[in-house]
């Protein structure tokens, strides 16, 4: 699943040009992000926090497939928020439906860091998808 939602304004993003790191909490897992390997071809915008997390085996719930049509991929960006593209009106509308909304809340499918600083991202408990299908 995944793709682009043709009914919303696509955010303007500044793609990273050098490697950086994202630490995901509460699992305290740090991943090296290499922009030369984008996209990871998962869900969300290429290079989004959701795409990066899924590309590194970190599960974040994303019921709509990462097309900004729900709020299940809601995360807290605890460090580096100012290096992520601005939220669109459509993202803000979806975030209004998210539980536990905070000033540093974002939809991980729409949040593309520019790579100028390392990030710390907390995945709220209700968004941690711990169930994995048998392989």
Image: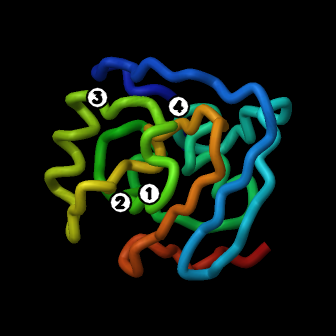
Dot 1, crowdedness within 10 Å: few (<14), some or many (≥20)? many
Mark toward the viewer: 1 or 4 = 1
Q: Position of residue 73 (x, y in %)?
A: 41, 57
Mark toward the viewer: 4 or 2 = 2
Q: CA distance from mark 1 to mark 3?
A: 16 Å
The residue that disc 4 covers is: 3
Please report contact status of discs 1 and 4: CB closer than 8 Å, yes or no. Answer: no
Q: Quadrant of the N terminus?
A: top right
Of helix, strand and loop, which one carries label 3?
loop
The residue that disc 3 covers is: 88
Please say if 28 is above or below 17. Answer: below
Q: In the rendered image, which quarter is residue 134 located in?
A: bottom right
Q: CA distance from mark 4 to mark 2?
A: 16 Å
Please say if 60 is above or below 2. Answer: below
* Residue sitting nearer the eye, 15 or 80: 80
Of helix, strand and loop, which one carries label 1?
strand
Dot 2, crowdedness within 10 Å: few (<14), some or many (≥20)? many
Q: Position of residue 2 (x, y in %)?
A: 53, 39
In the displayed structure image, the side of residue 85 where residue 48 appears, left or right: right
Q: CA distance from mark 1 to mark 4?
A: 23 Å
In the displayed structure image, the side of residue 17 where residue 24 appears, left or right: left
Q: Earlier in the sequence, mark 1 or mark 4?
A: 4
Dot 3, crowdedness within 10 Å: few (<14), some or many (≥20)? some
Q: Position of residue 49 (x, y in %)?
A: 56, 48
Q: Residue at x 47, y 70 (%)?
A: 123
The image's mark for residue 77 is 1
The residue that disc 2 covers is: 72
Q: Position of residue 69 (x, y in %)?
A: 30, 41
Q: Earlier in the sequence, mark 3 or mark 4?
A: 4
Of helix, strand and loop, which one carries label 2?
loop
């Amino acid at each position: 699943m995944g793709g682009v939602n043709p009914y919303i304004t696509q955010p303007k993003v500044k793609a990273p040009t050098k490697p950086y790191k994202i630490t995901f909490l509460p699992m305290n897992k740090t991943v090296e992000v290499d922009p030369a390997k984008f996209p990871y071809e998962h869900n969300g915008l290429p290079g989004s926090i959701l795409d990066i997390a899924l590309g590194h085996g970190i599960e974040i719930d994303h019921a709509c497939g990462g097309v900004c049509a729900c709020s299940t991929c809601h995360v807290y960006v605890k460090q580096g928020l100012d290096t992520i593209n601005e939220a669109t009106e459509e993202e803000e509308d979806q975030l209004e439906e998210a539980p536990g909304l905070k000033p540093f809340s974002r939809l991980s499918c729409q949040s593309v860091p520019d790579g100028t600083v390392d990030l710390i991202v907390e995945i709220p408990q209700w968004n941690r998808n711990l169930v994995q299908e048998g392989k």
